Image (cartoon, rainbow, N blue to C red):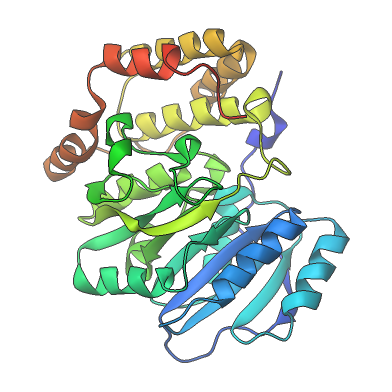
Amino acid sequence: MRIEMLKSPPATSATRLVAGSRPPLGAYDADIIILSLNRTAETLEAVQSALAQRGAAYHITVLDQCSDPETVVEIARTFGKSRNFALYAATENLGVAGGRNLATSLGHGQVIVALDNDATFEGKWVVARAIRAFAERPPLGALGFNILARDGVEPDKFSWGYPARLIDRYRDRFDTTTFVGAGHAIRRATWDAVGGYDESLFFTWEEYDFCLNAIALGWSIGYDGRLAVIHKVSPEGRVAWSANRMTYFVRNRLIIARKWGESWLSLTPRVMGYLLKALFNRRLAATIEGVRAAVNTDLPARRKMPNEMRSYLHAHEKQHRGSWLARLRFEVFAQAKLDP
């Protein structure tokens, strides 16, 4: 099955301000950005959670990416008169990467806080504490939040984007090499230095790609389990593993590896692991399509990793993940099923 959504979206998209007001001209602490695509009830809860944040000067930007008209009307009706809030409508679905790029460009806060529209902040001080973390650590470029399951107690295991052996530390802090998009913050200076997300990735691995570019420039990436969001994982509008998601997952990860100079020969174990996982989970056609799409993607000149970057990746990722055999055992055979 060929995946049409793998076409690269345009770099820009026309938007219109539907409700609320643009950010202030002067300086402020943070932009809170939320992408909307239906999920009306969940989006309303996410925005309300953002409006409840205290202890910082912030502006909320909701970018709707072609929801049903009723969704846009309901968001505008509910929050249109709120302070520090704006609802924009895009003319097309730019995907996660393109949507976040556009939403971020609409503000100029010193920190960019992103919240999925099926998630809520755990408390009223998450954004303020994230801002403080950047002030205390000048080299910190991005910060991943603790993504809790619907019960607000246990970690959302399907959203754990770090080495599996670290999941027991979900309430701790540690340096890492990526963050999970459902709840995170990025220093705007880092965002500007990197140039935002690669929009051609559209969906999945765009955070890891961004972080690799940031690490190459000397920034560090952190995880803070004390800063949490509650992730409801709404099935509405979600790209299911049984559809395009596995293809994006495989394609984008291989493209990122190729960007950083890995040869197809060195990627053979990874490709074989994906195929085994696909067989185990009945996703073979989607996985083969992902490999094919990666092979056929034209890439810019490949980059060489600085030695400092290699050391950082080894210390904060590779040594935690273990050998290929250990990873294969966990990712293929220890997981009975993929994310629904």
Looking at the rendered structure, the number of numbered marks drawn on it comes to 0
Indicate whether 107 appears above or below 312.
below
For the view shown, which residue lies furthest in the right direction?
70
Residue farthest to the bottom? 26
Task: Residue 321 in the image: state x and y as whole percent.
Answer: 26, 27
**Is residue 267 in sight in this rendering?**
no
x, y percentage for residue 183? 47, 56
Q: In front here: 27 or 116? A: 116
Residue located 48% across and 50% down the image: 181
Going by the image, does 119 lie left or right of 194?
right
Q: In the rendered image of this protein, does residue 27 appear above or below residue 159?
A: below
Residue 189 vertical position relative to residue 210 in the rendered view, above or below: below
Q: Quarter holding the C terminus? A: top right
Quarter of the rendering containing residue 292: top right
Where is the N terminus found, in terms of image quarters? top right
Quadrant of residue 84 within the rendered picture: bottom right
* Nearer to us in this view, 309 or 162: 162
Using residue 228 as the reference point, say whether residue 172 is left or right of it. left
Residue visible at 42% across and 57% down in the picture: 228
x, y (%) of residue 205?
46, 39
Is residue 322 visible to the viewer in this orientation of the structure?
yes
Residue at screen point 15% across, 38% down: 315
Q: Relative to the observer, which residue lies in front, 280 or 308?
A: 280
Given residues 14 and 287, the one toward you in this image is 287
Residue 218 placement, left or right of 296: left
Picture coordinates of residue 211, whole percent (x, y) = 34, 49
Give the residue displayed 36% in from the left and 37% down from the top: 301
